[in-house]
Image (cartoon, helix red, strand yellow):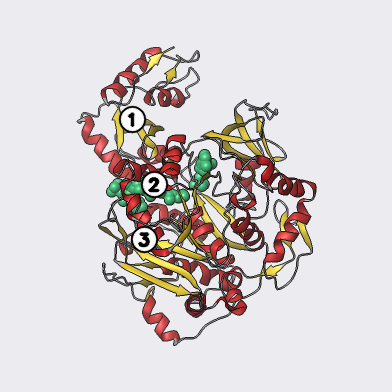
Amino acid sequence: MTSSQSRYFEVYDSWKRDPEGFWAEAAKDISWYRLWDKVHDPYAGHHGAWFAGAECNTAYNCLDRHVEAGRGDQTALIYDSPVTGTVKTFSYTELTAEVARLAHVLIELGVRTGDRVVIYMPMIPEAVISMLACARIGAVHSVVFGGFAAAELATRIDDSKPVAILSTSCGIEGSRVVPYKPLIDAAIERAQHKPRYCLILKRPMAEATLVPGRDLDWQEMLERGNGATVGPVAVKATDPLYVLYTSGTTGKPKGVVRDNGGHMVALKWTMPNFYDIAPGEVFWAASDVGWVVGHSYVCYAPLLHGATTLVYEGKPVGTPDAGAFWRVISQHKVSALFTAPTAFRAIKKEDPEGNLVRDYDLSSLRTLFLAGERADPETLKWAETKLQVPVIDHWWQTETGWAIAGNPVGLGLLPVKYGSPTVPMPGYALDVLDEVGNLLPCGKQGTIAIKLPLPPGCLPTLWQDDQRFRSSYLTQFPGYYSTSDAGFLDEDGYVYVMARTDDVINVAGHRLSTGQMEEVVAQHKDVAECAVIGVQDSLKGQLPVGFVVLNAGVDREASEVEAEVVQLVRDVIGPVAAFKTVMVVNRLPKTRSGKILRGTMRQMADGQAWAMPATIDDPAILEEIKAVLELRGLAQAKIV
Ligand code: COA
Ligand code: AMP
């Protein structure tokens, strides 16, 4: 298709001409208990608010509404778990009943509108049921990814102060059973805030010892409810639906707040217009519910749209092989798959010729969507060739909750330019700015900034920390939200997203902070100072690599300390940090003002051309680092 055949420009222009009219029109697809006073009120909330004055319920729109409209018998959710050998489906009627029953249990536990509930669960239907049960009663859920360790869970408990934690006895990582209960006990022990209750779903693969008075058996509580249900409550469109913590530059994660009304309007709009999905079709986001993609496209968007969502408890490879995705697509007639490029790199590594693709009937699959990290053209082209469907890269962040830029399949595809996630979506006006906020011309790289106000669905603030919201996103460029992504726009308005401008790295599609890792490494008793950088990795995109200088007088084998530092990061942040490489060095390279030259170290480790910084304090130290990197096979550095 040529750009003239796509409706994109017409739709984007209609938004630009009348943003409020555009979103008011989109909001007609949502059921409201009370309509808004203003589509966008610049004076409401901390930073303006969408649909201020309106009342709604997200769970109602995801569930009851479809049952009332005659979609009750349609499959709402498919649970496919190769790690337990289970496939189970829930119709809209059944899912509504499950959610309403769990909502009743939550009410019995004293959870009320506005209270927080932490959900720490693997990819099982109860994760989605828990999210929707919270939404039904207006409680604010905070899902914590299972790959985080107890200390990370404790940080989130202390920040969100939940009344209850909903969890299970274990998750399953490939063939490894990961007991969750000891992690929860350790997190609560560590946290200042103590939740009143933990509701624990016992899975047959692992026992869970319940603490009397605090821990409750999920199944028993549901049975005690004897089928009692509660209906959806009306909440304000601007009330929080959830808080999702994401990595920032420090050890303290950012609690991204999502509201109810704007979130529903934006997500619902994306299903036909961006993803080209019709109600009743199967939409599969192969992401964990612990990440934003899991929130938006495993739980909320497909259900808001009356589509069928798929909860997959498995991996792209190893459960049992690199044909796992193709098996799921053919078995459940998936229309669109959404995953991270790293998943395809993992598949390509195991099955470079794509032989396993041929074993399955993939005729249902119309489109593959990729996000979460830069889609490298090689992987994208491999997927296109093997699957013979359009492969759509799109760029978004936990903060935005939906795509900032992409190629809108539903509006008609624009020509693909490899390496670019294409064009901004309605709601997003992008500029590229230099360090002091000057507009940069086409082709020049700078920070990509979004003109305020942000569209519906984007974060209104950070949980209980409006000051941090402002300083993190709004103060650097007045009138803009800074994405902290560096990139450029080309003469056709295509955006290229190249790198983060902060300490955030992207490891296997997981957002992590090197600053946070440095804080943890520095806790080791023998470490005097340290630096953690993200280096390129052909499978996971990036991997963290640490450099540590030991305290004077420490007389131990470097390898011993290195192993302890690796274990420390795994224990404190969790296995998801994938922190496995650390090296003891004599000194860290610094500028004369004492700033560690992380950028130059990264260039060296990536084997890129690098230049001796003019401000360097002692050039010999960089030479030492280069030698250490080469010894570890990490650099083919050359001075230019
Ligand atoms: N619970 C417990 N541990 C977990 C976990 C969870 N939910 N998720 C990951 N881990 C562990 C892994 O088992 C691994 O442990 P190990 O060090 O003992 O091997 C470690 O955390 C690192 O995990 P990961 O980086 O994911 O590596 P992997 O080899 O297990 O899997 C991929 C690699 C590419 C297959 C996998 O990361 C993937 O599918 N990524 C896609 C991510 C995604 O969908 N992101 C959302 C945006 S769309
Ligand atoms: P997360 O908040 O986990 O969704 O991570 C958001 C970050 O991932 C962004 O700020 C980008 O750095 C990166 N990212 C996500 N999608 C893309 C993409 N399609 N292209 C390039 N970078 C991306």
Residue 241: image quadrant is: bottom right
Give the label on residue 343, or none: 2
Which element carries disc 2, helix, strand or loop?
A: helix
Q: Give the residue pinned by disc 1.
A: 548
Give me the C-alpha separation between circle 3 and circle 2. Answer: 14 Å
Q: How many marks?
A: 3
Give me the C-alpha separation between circle 3 and circle 1. Answer: 37 Å
Position of residue 63 measured from the top left corner of the image (x, y, whole percent): 56, 73
Return the residue nearer the eye: 301 or 165: 301
**Residue at figure coordinates x 45%, y 46% from the top left:** 388
Residue 574 visible in the picture: no
Question: Vertical placement of 431 versus 130: above or below?
Answer: above
Position of residue 162 measured from the top left corner of the image (x, y, whole percent): 49, 65
Q: Earlier in the sequence, mark 3 or mark 2?
A: 3
Mark 2 lies within 8 Å of ligand 1 (Cβ measured): yes
Position of residue 424 measured from the top left corner of the image (x, y, whole percent): 64, 42
Question: Vertical placement of 246 versus 34: above or below?
Answer: above
Q: Give the residue pinned by disc 3.
A: 313
Question: Vertical placement of 410 versus 507: above or below?
Answer: below
Q: Give the mark toward the camera: 3 or 1.
A: 3
Give me the C-alpha separation between circle 1 and circle 2. Answer: 31 Å
**Residue at figure coordinates x 62%, y 59% from the top left:** 263
Pointer 3 with pointer 2, Cβ within 8 A: no
